[in-house]
Amino acid sequence: MKSTLITGITGQDGSYLAEFLLKKGYKVYGLKRRTSTENNENIGHIQNQIELISGDLNDLPSLIEAIRISKPDEVYNLGAQSFVECSWSQPIYTTEITALGVTNILEAIRLVKPDTRFYQASSSEMFGKVLETPQKETTPFYPRSPYGVAKVYGHWISINYRESYNMFTSSGILFNHESPRRGLEFVTRKVTNTVAKIKLGLEDELRLGNLYAKRDWGFAGDYVEAMWLMLQQDQPDDYVIATGETHTVKELVEIAFEYVGLDWEKYVVTDPKFMRPAEVDILLGNPQKARKHLGWEPRVSFEELIKMMVDSDLAKFK
Ligand code: NAP
Ligand code: G4F
């Protein structure tokens, strides 16, 4: 039985990946930081099949202990301060977790079990003010937020451990991926959750920032399979994971409102509070390399994704 350690197991991707690896027959360990109130919403349904280890990406001894306990064949480093907007109000914390946290977990692996295969959750946010469209593995980075800068560090330190210590480290440069388990602060879930509330008479407006930003949005359930595939290859490498389609926030809003039979223009209010100091205007990924080498394809379309999320939020409030 293969053993795996997932950091960020309580998050959106961590929960889908844990489900995926359990089905593959893995022994699944999850690193979980201490919180004063329970936040096991995403993993409650599998909690008796996984083992949680208390630790924090900012605390090297706890990571060393987590590697000692789990003796992992594979580590998936999904833990991060992952909300871009928050990275301007908490830039140092974001750097400590999203950037230095990667070195901490790599050091723990190097010291305790250097033959562990390592996945780093890199991000399309690294492309930022894009220097080429569509973006691929060789597109230069131009991050536009403290989060994006931290992810560039995490990406390069993973490559550096591959080259310095011959460790098996692969990074997935994942474009935005969403699901009913997405945090409420991200734009897709904010929209689908508020649309459900408006439909049920629980809310009467949706306040948003930039409606013209474009993102390449896919389904998180599809994307965790790509993470696993990367660690099954003969050689470590980095891959863009995306759908190859881009849509504006406005299109997302239109689809969600139309699905419940409402006119979005009656409810959406633009609020400068949600505008960012520096925006990423367009992301569009080229997943050709993943298609060719991993045999990976996204399955859920943009429209299906939004409808799935609206349905889930409607069911929750009903
Ligand atoms: P998420 O839902 O925000 O989950 C983040 C996870 O990290 C949570 O489990 C969180 O724990 C944990 N975490 C935060 N700070 C930590 C710390 N100091 N020590 C240990 N764990 C900590 O994010 P996601 O959407 O699943 O994304 C997973 C990873 O992929 C992240 O690294 C993200 O930056 C990256 N990524 C995401 C996307 C996307 O579109 N979703 C795209 C590209 C890259 P709590 O539950 O305690 O907060
Ligand atoms: O949903 P978002 O907050 O996601 P963002 O900033 O693209 O970051 C996500 O994807 C990255 C991959 O590219 C990940 F690395 C990162 O961890 C995270 O998962 O915002 C998407 C777009 C932005 O352009 C934002 O300005 O939506 C725009 N937007 C417009 N109004 C809004 C809002 N975003 C949020 N969160 N809230 C709004 O009211």
Image: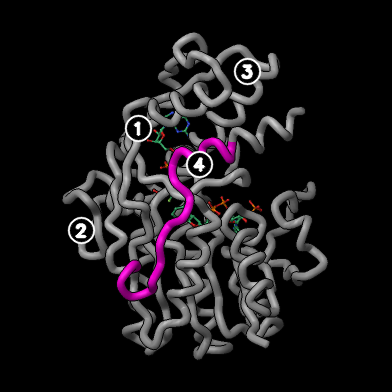
Whether residue 275 appears in this view of the structure is yes
> Element type at marker 4?
helix
Q: Tell me the number on the disc at residue 196.
A: none
Which three-letter amino acid code belongs to the residue tagged 4?
Glu
View quadrant of ligand 2: top left
> Element type at marker 3?
helix
Of discs 3 and 2, which sits in the foreground? Answer: 3
Residue 135 drawn above or below residue 75: above
In the foreground, 237 or 295: 295
Which three-letter amino acid code belongs to the residue tagged 1?
Thr
- Classify residue 280 by image quadrant: top left
State which region is magenta.
Answer: 290-309
Q: Is mark 2 within 8 Å of ligand 2?
A: no
Residue at 55% over, 76% down: 75
Return the disc, 1 or 4, that comes first in the chain's sequence.
Answer: 1
Residue at 42% over, 78% down: 169
Determine which residue is flagged by label 3. 198
Determine which residue is flagged by label 2. 140
Q: Residues within 10 Å of mark 2 (few under 14, many from 20)?
A: some
Query: x, y (%) of residue 185?
Result: 55, 36
Residue 212 drawn above or below residue 61: above
> Element type at marker 2?
loop
Query: x, y (%) of residue 303?
Result: 46, 38
Q: Residues within 10 Å of mark 1 (few under 14, many from 20)?
A: some
Determine which residue is flagged by label 1. 248
In the foreground, 209 or 203: 203
Residue 305 drawn above or below residue 116: above
Residue at 78% over, 55% down: 44
Task: Please say whether residue 303 is one of the residues in the magenta stretch.
Answer: yes
Count of numbered tags: 4
Q: Which residue ends up furthest to the left in the rendered image?
A: 132
Which three-letter amino acid code belongs to the residue tagged 2?
Pro
